[in-house]
Amino acid sequence: MAGMDERLKGIASFVQAVEAGSFAVAAERLHQTRSAVGKSIARLELRLGVRLFHRTTRSQSLTESGQLFYERCKRLLAELEAAEAELDAGGREPMGRLRITAPTLLGRLCVAPILSQLVQRYPQLELEMAFTDRVIDLLEEGFDLAVRIGDLPDSASLAARPLGTQQLALYAAPHYLHAHGEPNTADEFAGHSAIAYAGVGPETPWQIRDAGGHIQELKVKRRLRFNDVQAMADAAMAGAGITRLPHWLATTHVQRGELKRLAIADVGSTKMAIHALWPQQRHLPAKMRVAIDALVAEMPARLTATLPLPA
């Protein structure tokens, strides 16, 4: 059995090295050293009697034999995962490492508190959470599960479940509104400074519904832009201008008197769906099932609740 375990480790290292594009990235995903991965693949090549990679100092690519072996190994590992998932579905306790990614602040305030409880509940479960506002390719970067804000791409390789809706509104510091006045019409926004989100893609227009029910785009000066919503909230509390924030972040600041929600109705992208997203598979392992179920059950309340702020 020890020999079989070593063979499977070599195969796993080989497949990871192919899919990661380098031994260094494969080692990081496997929580091993680059040297250990390289030695494992070298032993595999020695046992098979063929070279699996063309290696140079700057790149690596599969040989013809390596490509054939990779396709077979990938099917083998997929069958092993399916067999384990079937056992999981039969009631086995969640176990193993689960890699999750989520937007930075949403992940810290909403996702981490929910999923961290699972580690206490299931002793054999390991969680690795990476928070970034960059859109991660789950298959390419080796993540099991993602939490995403906004529209999802059409993909036959991914599955999703809705977790709730993020509500957005316009906010400013009370002392800013006292000094500059609270805008109640589109024209009154002309003299105000806006604190905008500088994410990937075009900026979303700020729109309001006027007294006659018509939607108007606000002509605001975006004098400050951040790619971090907490920085936007901090700037607004400092009196730098008006900003648009999600309810789950702004509520605590409003209750402290640090921010005031503008009475005017912001209708531009005020609701954004939040989903759990994972690679499509026939059998969902128990470790993924419990994580998804926990998010589905608890995220809606967290998106509308008053949350503790990060230190």
Image (cartoon, grey):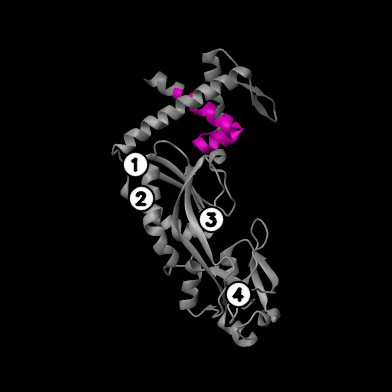
Quarter-of-image position of residue 284: top left
Q: Are marks 4 and 3 in contact (CB under 8 Å)?
A: no
Q: Are marks 2 and 1 in contact (CB under 8 Å)?
A: yes
- Using a 10 Å C-alpha cutoff, classify the residue at mark 1 as few (fewer than 14 neighbours), some (14 to 19) or many (20 or more): many
Q: Earlier in the sequence, mark 4 or mark 2?
A: 2
Spatial distance from mark 1 to mark 3, Cα to Cα?
25 Å
Magenta stretch, residue numbers: 8-33
The residue carrying mark 2 is 118
Spatial distance from mark 4 to mark 1, Cα to Cα?
47 Å
Outermost residue to the left: 91
Q: Are marks 2 and 3 in contact (CB under 8 Å)?
A: no
* 255 vs 139: above or below: below
Seen at 57% across and 48% down, the residue is: 153
Spatial distance from mark 2 to mark 1, Cα to Cα?
9 Å
* 107 vs 48: above or below: below
**Is 105 inside the magenta-drawn segment?**
no
Mark 2: which secondary structure? helix
x, y (%) of residue 11? Answer: 49, 24
Determine which of the numbered discs, if any, sits on residue 94 in the image.
1
* Residue 36 appears in view: no
